[in-house]
Image (spheres, rainbow, N blue to C red):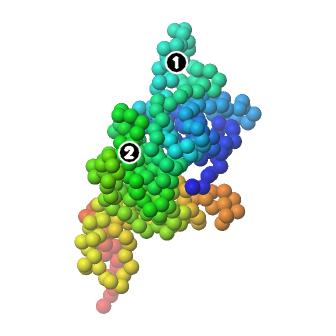
C-alpha cells in the first residue's frame, strides 16, 4: 500500500488527506479522499477561511459523495469532459458520481429571487448525493482509477488483485475488458494517455511499468503489454503521461527515483544495440532521464501543464530526515527533449562563437 501523507488543508481542518484532485471544469472545486468511505467536495471560494484567517469558522465540505461500503483511500479521478467523479476503495468497487446532477437539481429547486452568492454546489449543511453507478469486478482493493480523456462514460481501474479493468458505464456495471494478470503483483497506479486514448500505462509492486494498447485487448481478458519498462528497484507508486509530448511519461517509486520515459525511443534503442560498446553500461530502452534528488521513496509527482517539462514531486523523508515529506519543483535540461537537429545547430553556433572569441596564440 502507498504511504499516506498528512496535510493541513487551507480550509482550516486537520484531515488525513490521501489524495486531492481539481475539477477541470471549475478550478475552485476540489475533491479529496480521506481514510473514510466518502469523497468530499469543496468549493474553495465558499469556504469561510479561504484566506487562512486565524480564528475563522471551521470548514465543512460543500458536498459529500456516498456509495462506498469501506474506506476509499487513494483511487480518485475527475473527468476532463464533464463534472464526473470516480473512486475506488477497499470494498473492491469502482463508484461513479455526477456533480452536475446535484447542480441541476439545485438550479431547478432554487427560488427565482435567489442571489448569486455562495457555493454553486451547496444547498444545505453537508449535503450528500448517491452514485450514478457502482461497478463490481475487482477481487481486492482498488488502488487507482482514471477516466478516458475523450469520454466521461469510459474509465479504467487497477487493484491489488493484479487486474487492469476497462469499464463503459453506457453498457452496464460489469467490466468491458478485464486483464486478469496485467502485472506479477499488486497494481498501484494507472494513467490514460491524453493525446491517444488507446494507450494506458500501469505501475506495480513488481517494480515495472507496462504500456497497454486497448485495441489489443478483448472482453475475455486476452492481451499483453506493448512494452514493459523495467529500471526501478522497488514498487512503482505513480505514473503520469507528459502533457507536452504524446510518447513521454514519468514513473516514481519506493526506490526514490523518478524516471522519464519515451516509448518511441524503444525501437531506436534496439536498432542501435549493434553499434554500442559492449563494455558501456546502457540505460534500458525508452529511459532518457532519471531524477535522483530525493532521499527516500517518491509517493507522488505531477507534470505542470502550464510550464512545459516542469515537474513537482513529493517524497516521504520522515525516517531519513526526522520530519515530514519533501516537495521539489524541477526541470530537466532542455537539450534532452528538444529536436536533435536543433540542439546540434545550437551547439555548433556556440562552438563557432567560442572560436571567434578565443585569442590566437602568438608564434
Image label count: 2
Q: In this rendering, would 8 be left or right of 193? A: right
Q: Which residue is mark 2?
A: 166
In the rendered view of the protein, which quadrant contains the C terminus?
A: bottom left
Given this view, does label 2 or label 1 mark the residue nearer the observer? 2
Question: Where does the image place residue 231, in percent across and percent down from the top left?
Answer: 43, 68
Q: Nearer the viewer, residue 160 or 256?
A: 160
Q: Quadrant of residue 349?
A: bottom left
Residue tagged 1: 106
Identify which residue is drawn at 34% across, 77% down: 358
Quadrant assignment, res 350 = bottom left
In-image side of 257 versus 55 (left or right): left
Badge 2 vs badge 1, beta-carbon distance below 8 Å:
no
Query: Residue at (34%, 73%) from the top-left corner?
Result: 354
User: What residue sits 62% from the left and 21% below the top?
Assistant: 124
Looking at the rendering, which quadrant does residue 146 occupy?
A: top left
Amino acid at each position: 500500500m502507498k504511504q499516506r501523507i498528512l496535510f493541513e488543508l487551507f480550509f482550516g481542518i486537520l484531515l488525513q488527506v490521501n489524495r486531492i484532485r481539481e475539477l477541470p471544469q471549475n478550478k475552485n472545486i476540489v475533491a479529496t479522499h480521506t481514510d473514510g468511505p466518502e469523497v468530499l467536495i469543496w468549493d474553495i471560494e465558499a469556504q469561510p477561511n479561504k484566506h487562512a484567517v486565524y480564528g475563522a469558522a471551521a470548514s465543512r465540505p460543500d458536498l459529500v459523495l456516498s456509495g462506498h461500503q469501506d474506506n476509499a483511500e487513494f483511487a480518485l479521478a475527475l473527468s476532463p469532459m464533464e463534472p464526473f467523479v470516480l473512486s475506488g476503495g477497499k470494498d473492491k468497487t469502482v463508484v461513479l458520481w455526477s456533480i452536475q446532477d446535484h447542480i441541476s437539481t439545485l438550479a431547478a429547486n432554487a427560488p427565482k429571487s435567489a442571489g448569486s452568492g455562495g457555493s454553486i454546489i451547496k444547498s444545505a449543511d453537508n449535503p450528500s448525493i448517491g452514485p450514478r453507478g457502482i461497478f463490481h469486478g475487482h477481487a481486492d482493493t482498488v488502488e487507482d482509477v482514471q477516466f478516458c480523456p475523450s469520454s466521461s462514460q469510459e474509465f479504467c481501474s487497477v487493484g491489488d488483485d493484479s487486474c487492469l479493468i476497462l469499464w463503459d458505464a453506457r453498457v452496464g456495471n460489469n467490466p468491458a475488458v478485464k486483464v486478469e494478470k496485467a502485472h506479477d503483483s499488486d497494481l498501484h497506479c494507472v494513467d490514460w494517455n491524453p493525446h491517444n486514448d488507446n494507450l494506458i500505462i500501469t505501475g506495480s509492486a513488481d517494480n515495472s511499468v507496462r504500456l497497454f494498447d486497448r485495441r489489443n485487448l478483448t472482453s475475455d481478458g486476452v492481451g499483453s503489454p506493448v512494452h514493459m519498462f523495467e529500471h526501478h528497484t522497488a514498487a512503482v507508486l505513480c505514473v503520469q503521461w507528459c502533457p507536452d509530448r504524446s510518447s513521454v511519461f514519468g514513473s516514481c517509486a519506493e526506490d526514490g527515483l523518478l524516471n522519464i520515459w519515451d516509448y518511441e525511443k524503444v525501437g531506436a534503442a534496439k536498432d542501435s544495440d549493434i553499434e554500442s560498446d559492449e563494455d558501456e553500461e546502457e540505460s534500458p530502452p525508452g529511459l532518457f532521464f532519471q531524477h535522483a534528488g530525493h532521499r527516500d521513496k517518491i509517493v507522488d509527482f505531477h507534470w505542470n501543464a502550464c510550464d512545459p517539462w516542469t515537474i513537482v514531486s513529493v517524497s516521504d523523508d520522515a525516517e531519513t530526515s526526522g520530519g515530514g515529506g519533501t516537495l521539489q519543483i524541477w526541470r530537466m535540461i532542455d537539450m534532452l527533449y528538444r529536436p536533435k537537429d536543433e540542439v546540434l545547430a545550437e551547439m555548433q553556433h556556440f562552438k563557432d562563437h567560442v572560436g571567434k572569441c578565443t585569442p590566437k596564440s602568438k608564434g
